[in-house]
Amino acid sequence: MKAVAGYHNADLSSLAKLALASVYRNTNRTKDALELYKQLVAKPTDTVGKSIVEVQLAETYEVAGMKAEAKKQYEQIQKEAPQSQAAQLASAKLQELK
């Protein structure tokens, strides 16, 4: 997966990075997962949109016990696209964090 994540094709690379970040998150490599999610948020592609990654980033913060960071990320999602499904999910997650 790491090899594919380094491809020059941005769409393919971003899909591989998203998958790799998920693997990292599920194997307690939180720091590595957060780094990949942040890269993807900074450079969204057609195959991996910003809101999808922002939700994954926030959930990773939440799972890692970093509730303040999770809350901040969920609030950012709401601010950027208040009518989106991601914002609705963020709103529900914020209620759970209270």
Image: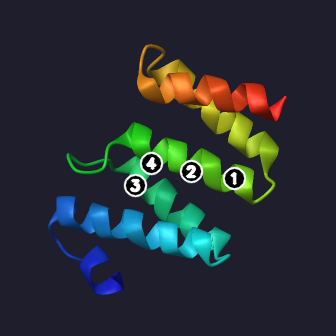
**Where residue 7 sits: x, y (%)?**
20, 76
Badge 2 or badge 3: first in the primary sequence: 3
Question: Mark 3 and mark 4 in contact (Cβ < 8 Å)?
Answer: yes
Give the SS element for disc 2.
helix
Secondary structure beneath label 3: helix
Q: Of residues 63 and 2, which is closer to you in this image? A: 63
Badge 4 vs badge 2, beta-carbon distance below 8 Å: yes
Of circles 2 and 3, the one toward us is: 2
Residue of label 4: 53
Q: Position of residue 67 (x, y in %)?
A: 80, 44
Residue 52, percent across and down?
41, 43
Q: Dot 2 surroundings within 10 Å: few (below 14), some, or many (20 or more)?
A: many
> Which label sits on residue 40?
3
- Quarter of the view holding residue 78: top right
Q: Quadrant of the C terminus?
A: top right
Q: Is residue 75 visible?
A: no
Whether tag 1 and tag 3 are in contact, CB under 8 A, the answer is: no
> Split into 4 quadrants, where in the image is the N terminus?
bottom left
Please give the residue where the numbered disc 1 appears in the rendered image. Answer: 61
Q: CA distance from mark 2 to mark 3?
A: 10 Å
Name the amino acid, label 4: Val
Which residue reaches farthest right? 98
Instruction: Kindly check if marks 1 and 2 are in contact, taking CB atoms under 8 A apart as contact.
Output: yes
Q: Which residue is mark 2?
A: 57
Residue type, mark 2 in image: Leu
